[in-house]
Amino acid sequence: MIVSPNLRELREGYGDIRHAFNAIAAVDALAGHIWRWCRDHAPQEIVGAKNDIGFKQRLAEANADFALVRDMAKAQKHVHLDHGAPALKGADQIEARRMGWGQARWGEGRWGSPQQVVVETDLGEVRVVEAVLGRALMFLECEMERVGITPSTSTG
């Protein structure tokens, strides 16, 4: 699976924006792979989702971390988001920077690090991308298990 190497590279190089962008794209794409697998093997799981966009919307409504990942991936792809109500409007809101005490959600940051990749949402909340991706991936893995995707049947 492409997700694991990208997340490992981000964990090792948590201040590198390139690693963050690759990991964001990989986790977002995993949701597309889940939709495709369900289309072929468990269509009852995606009723009402005509494509992976509709499926990702459903996942985003169920999990705030995945919703943020989806919005970051869309911002990376389109640079600026004009439609809907995304958590961020532009890719420039994802950056590597130093974090001080109380500047991000409790438990997300790495203390004493020179810098880490964060996203500042349109609501002014600063989130550590590595932590958001980890929780979004756990959510997607639970979804995979729920619908019956195992490592031997996965396409992601």
Image: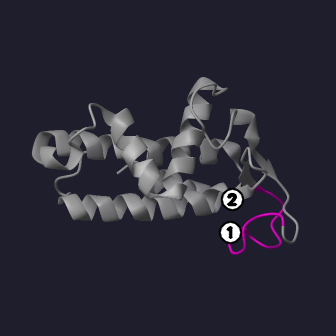
Left or right placement of residue 107 versus residue 135 in this view: right
Task: Name which of mark 1 and mark 2 comes first in the sequence.
Answer: 1
Secondary structure at numbered mark 1: loop
Answer with the quarter of the image where residue 101 lies: bottom right
Considering every residue shown, the one lying at the far right of the view is 100
Q: What is the x, y in percent for residue 144?
A: 27, 58
Does residue 23 show up magenta in the picture?
A: no
Left or right placement of residue 52 versus residue 62 in this view: left
Residue designated by label 1: 108
Highlighted range, magenta: 103-116
Q: Is residue 156 visible?
A: no
**Which of the labelled discs sits on residue 46, or is there none?**
none
138 versus 68 height, above or below: below
Q: What is the x, y in percent for residue 27?
A: 46, 48
Residue designated by label 2: 128
Q: What is the x, y in percent for residue 148?
A: 17, 60
13 versus 75 height, above or below: below
Near mark 2 (Cα within 10 A), the count class, few <14, some 14-19 or many ≥20, is: many
Secondary structure at numbered mark 2: strand
Does residue 115 show up magenta in the picture?
A: yes
| Contact? badges 1 and 2 (CB < 8 Å) | yes
Answer with the quarter of the image where residue 142 lies: bottom left
Q: Residue at x 61, y 47 (%)?
A: 19
| Coloring applied to the structure | one colour
Q: Nearer the viewer, residue 85 or 111?
A: 85
